[in-house]
Image (cartoon, rainbow, N blue to C red):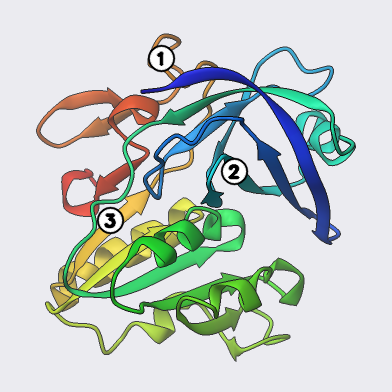
């Protein structure tokens, strides 16, 4: 059940110039599924911002955030012990499959995948993709739970190229879980159709409320018509999307 809470900031860690790891103590041990998210109130910003739960340990939640505007800059300036309002857990997370798991994240799209790697029973493969090495963060933490592969478009770290280059050997025996830029997700969708592997994608969308009231995140689904990403997603089976 989702709750509105005042959480205490445990730590604010700058990982790279544009990435932030924010950890808060909610004071309550709520169950969180990988792929679910929270709406965080940022200092001096009217509307809450949606962020995937990156990690959950007891009452502590961590969020991997790309600093991109006034709201995220405000979160980066929070001090330990400060109070922050949040609503969580929200949305539908990933459905865990018994198939061999491959997790694919582009840029800050890796955010929901760490908790997923922890919750999967079989050690998965994780592919972390970015434009440059400055987009690759938390690789050592992922390595605690998964085999890690890295791709960068400029070749500054790992294999040069796109994440799809690492997926050519997949088959119907694999389940792929992905989050990142929409062009990456659409490329995975096309590859999944060719290779016949299961694919779930976490969609990123503009959200003002996170609970299906503002209708700011409506997207089309093949069978259901228009649905809210915040309540029916953010995780969808790729075959259900009209791509």
Q: Residue at x 55, y 54 (%)?
A: 111
Precedes in sequence: disc 2 or disc 3: 2
Q: Residue at x 40, y 50 (%)?
A: 34
Dot in front, 1 or 2:
2
* In this rendering, position of residue 30 left or right of residue 1: right
State which quadrant residue 175 falls in.
Answer: bottom left
Find the distance from the CA under tag 1 to the CA under tag 2: 27 Å
* In this rendering, position of residue 65 left or right of residue 170: right
Contact between marks 2 and 3 (CB within 8 A): the answer is: no
Precedes in sequence: disc 3 or disc 1: 3
In the depicted structure, whether residue 30 falls above or below residue 58: above
Q: Which mark is residue 71?
A: none
* In this rendering, position of residue 187 left or right of residue 195: right
Q: Which mark is residue 215?
A: 1
Q: Position of residue 196 (x, y in %)?
A: 13, 73
Residue topped by disc 3: 200
* In this rendering, position of residue 19 left or right of residue 93: right
Precedes in sequence: disc 1 or disc 2: 2
Residue topped by disc 2: 61
């Amino acid at each position: 059940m989702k709750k509105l809470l005042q959480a205490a900031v445990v730590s604010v860690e700058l990982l790279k110039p544009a990435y932030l790891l924010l950890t808060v103590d909610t004071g309550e041990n709520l169950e969180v599924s990988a792929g679910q998210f929270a709406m965080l109130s940022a200092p001096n910003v009217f509307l809450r911002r949606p962020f995937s739960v990156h990690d959950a340990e007891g009452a502590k939640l961590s969020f991997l955030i790309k600093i991109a505007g006034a709201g995220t800059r405000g979160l980066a300036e929070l001090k330990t012990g400060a109070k922050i309002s949040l609503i969580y857990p929200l949305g539908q997370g990933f459905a865990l499959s018994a198939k061999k798991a491959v997790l694919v994240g582009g840029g800050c799209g890796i955010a929901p995948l760490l908790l997923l790697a922890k919750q999967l029973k079989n050690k998965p493969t994780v592919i972390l993709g970015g434009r440059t090495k400055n987009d690759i963060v938390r690789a050592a933490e992922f390595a605690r739970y998964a085999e890690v592969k890295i791709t960068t478009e400029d070749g500054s770290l790992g294999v040069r190229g796109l994440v799809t280059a690492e997926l050519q050997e997949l088959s119907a025996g694999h389940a792929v879980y992905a989050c990142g830029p929409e062009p990456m997700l659409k490329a995975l969708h096309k590859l999944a159709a060719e290779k016949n592997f299961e694919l779930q994608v976490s969609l990123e969308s503009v959200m003002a409320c996170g609970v299906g009231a503002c209708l700011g995140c409506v997207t089309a689904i093949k069978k259901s018509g228009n649905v809210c990403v915040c309540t029916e997603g953010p995780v969808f089976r790729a075959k259900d999307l009209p791509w």
